[in-house]
Amino acid sequence: MNMNDLSEADIRTKFILPALEKAGWDRMTKIREVAYFTDGRIMVPGKMVSRNKGKYYFGPIDADYLLAPGDFIIPMTEQAAGLLVSPVSIPDNELTYLHNQRLGKLTISEAVSTSFIFHFFNSRFFSNELWRTSTGAKAKHNSPDRVLRIPTPLSPLAEQFRIVAKVDDLMVLCDDLDVSLTRTQTESRRLLEAVLFELQSQPET
C-alpha cells in the first residue's frame, strides 16, 4: 500500500486510530476526531471584513483535559466583562467540555458540599475579593493561589446542607416574585393603553 495514495482521513482511520486503541486509548472517552477552539479572529482591513482560519486540535484528547459533569471551574482570565467572577459547574449533557490554562478547576473535599461552595463563590463577598486581588490593567488575571487565599467560612456539613436548602428556597421565592412583577407590569401597561385609547376615542366637546 502506497501511503502517498491515501488521504488524511484514510491514514487516520487505517493507522492512527487502531494504534491509539491498541495503546489503551478508549475511543468513546479519550479520542475525538476534531475539537474546535475558536471560529477565527474577525479581521477588518479597510472596508472588507474577513475571518481568519479557525483554531482546532486534531487527534486524541487526554482524559486529564476532559471536564466531567459536576466539575467546578472558575475563570483565571477575564476575557469578557464579569467573566472573572463567574464560577460555574459543568452541566450534565451530551456536550464535551475541555479544560485549558485560563480555567481553574477545583477539587471539592467530601467534607464540603459542592452546592455550598457554588453559592459562596457566587456571593458578593467572594466576587469582590476575587476582583480586588486580581492583577492586570486591560484584562484582569487571577491565580489558584489567590483564590485559595480568600477566606471561606466552613460550617459542619449538615449545616451547609441546611444553608443550601434555605438559599434554594429563597431563589425560588425570588423567581416567583420576578414572575409576579413582570405580570403586574404587563397588566399595568395594558390598563394604561386601555385608558389612553378610551380618552382618545371620546368626542371633543
Image (cartoon, rainbow, N blue to C red):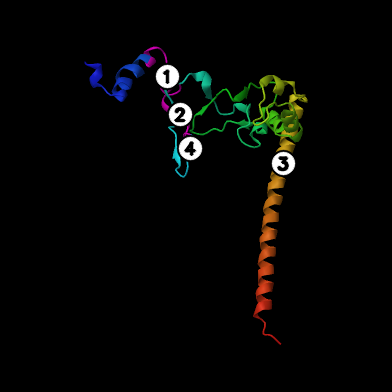
Q: Nearer the viewer, residue 138 or 196?
A: 138
Residue 35 highlighted magenta (yes or no): yes
Query: Which residue position is annotated with label 3?
Result: 169
- The mark closer to the camera, 4 or 2, is 4
Query: Which residue position is annotated with label 4?
Result: 43
Query: Which residue position is annotated with label 2?
Result: 55
Looking at the rendered structure, the secondary structure element under dot 2 is strand
Q: Does residue 109 appear in the picture of this structure? A: no
The kind of residue tagged 2 is Lys
Which sits earlier in the primary sequence, circle 2 or circle 1?
1
Residue 167 in the image: state x and y as whole percent: 73, 38
Give me the C-alpha separation between circle 4 and circle 3.
48 Å
- The mark closer to the camera, 3 or 1, is 1
The kind of residue tagged 1 is Asp
The kind of residue tagged 3 is Asp
Which sits earlier in the primary sequence, circle 1 or circle 4?
1
Query: Which residue position is annotated with label 1?
Result: 26
Q: Is residue 108 left or right of residue 99?
A: right
Give the residues in magenta. Answer: 20-40
Residue 17 in the image: state x and y as whole percent: 35, 19
